[in-house]
Amino acid sequence: MKTSFFLDVCKYICILWASFFIQASFAQSSSWPDRPVKIIVPFAVGGATDIAARIIAPALSEQLGQQFFVEIKAGAAGNIALEHVAQSAPDGYTILIGNVSTNSINEILYASKLKVKPSTSFKTVALVASIPNILVSGPNFPPNNMKELVAYAKARPGELNFSSPLGGYSHLDMLDFNRRAGISMVNVPSKGAGSSQTGLISGDIHFSIVNAASTTTLIKAGKLKAFATTSANRLFSFPDLPTFTESGFGGVGSDQWNGLFVPAKTPPIIINKLHTALNQATQKLQIKEAFTGAGMSILASLSQEEAQNFVNNEMQRWARIIKENQVNLE
């Protein structure tokens, strides 16, 4: 009898403690954010993901009444930032602004190297922006359109190169383009948009697929030559630039996208509050104009579930592309 009574008391105390911690956790989540929030960028300064982060950080600060600030954790194809955020406390104070590479491609390409699994280690909060990509060369490269480019490359198998971060979306898109066009070019791994642009302008690099956000000014200044865009429709900034589909390569190339991600165990109340705040912020005219001016379009998601489904579908699509092009980086 005494043993049974003792066990009953222990169970009752455990229930009380569990109830206390649940209530305390809920109260803490309800007051979020009550201190500054870090938005972790997995790539170098000046890239599209960094630009998007610096647009939304002050907008979220205004919306939620606490400072949101950007912190760069670049390296290892974005995996350093992936692991850092996934292993952070799930309290809403460390957020990842991931993109197509970190949250759709890396899990497939770096399965044995990653210490976390993006599909289960994160919850997608919301999509942020979509950024069209453009196939470009330096200004002195002889071809002037896609037909001339393909003919020029076919006549020089293995002699031409392209620059892209190894395993990134632009690397996979260029491999897909090579295969579909029947050409053979060599990849020169880059450390980001800046290094590719420098090589293109100097002529050391022949081609690259780059995002419009970081190259529109260079193209308009004549420092880069554009051949085609990955977007479904022609770009407002370049109405004379054909799409890959119009150039005879439908299905080749992809727009970059980015979104906000938090550790998987982050309370739903925080995820929903952040999702709502981002959607409200991106409805403001100055935010829309900031994205448009950077060559991006807002990629709103009606719900957290819709955003999560989008990322899941992207992972399946990239798995197919990786398999078709027999890419193995491990």
Image (cartoon, helix red, strand yellow):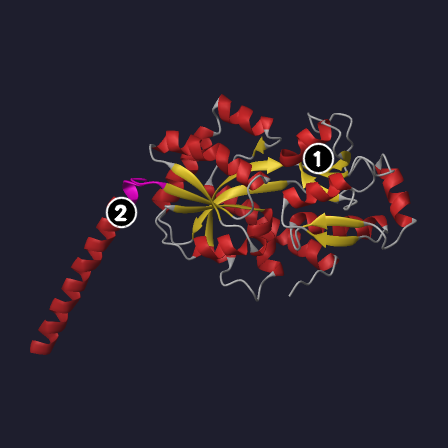
Tell me, for residue 26, which label it has, or none: 2
- Image coordinates of residue 310 in percent, x first then y, are 56, 45
> What range of the chain is rendered magenta?
29-36
The quadrant in which residue 281 appears is: top left
- Image coordinates of residue 71 in percent, x first then y, are 45, 44
Residue 251 visible in this rendered orientation of the protein: no
Look at the image and say whether residue 114 sits in the magenta stretch.
no
- Image coordinates of residue 163 in percent, x first then y, are 72, 48
Tell me, for residue 295, which label it has, or none: none
Q: Tell which circle, 1 or 2, labels the residue nearer the N-terminal end.
A: 2
Disc 1 residue type? Ala
Q: CA distance from mark 1 to mark 2?
A: 44 Å
- For label 1, the SS is loop
The quadrant in which residue 68 appears is: top left
Disc 2 residue type? Phe
- Image coordinates of residue 95 in percent, x first then y, are 43, 46
Look at the image and say whether residue 32 sits in the magenta stretch.
yes
Residue at position x 51%, y 59% in the image: 117
Q: In the image, is 149 to the left or to the right of 301?
A: right
Q: Which residue is mark 1?
A: 232
Vertical relation: 19 (above or below) 288 = below
Q: Magenta-highlighted stretch: main secondary structure? A: loop
Residue 151 visible in this rendered orientation of the protein: yes
Q: In the image, is 13 to the left or to the right of 95?
A: left
Dot 1 crowding, Cα within 10 Å, few <14, some 14–19, many 20+ = some
Vertical relation: 116 (above or below) 235 = below
Q: In the image, is 53 to the left or to the right of 60?
A: right
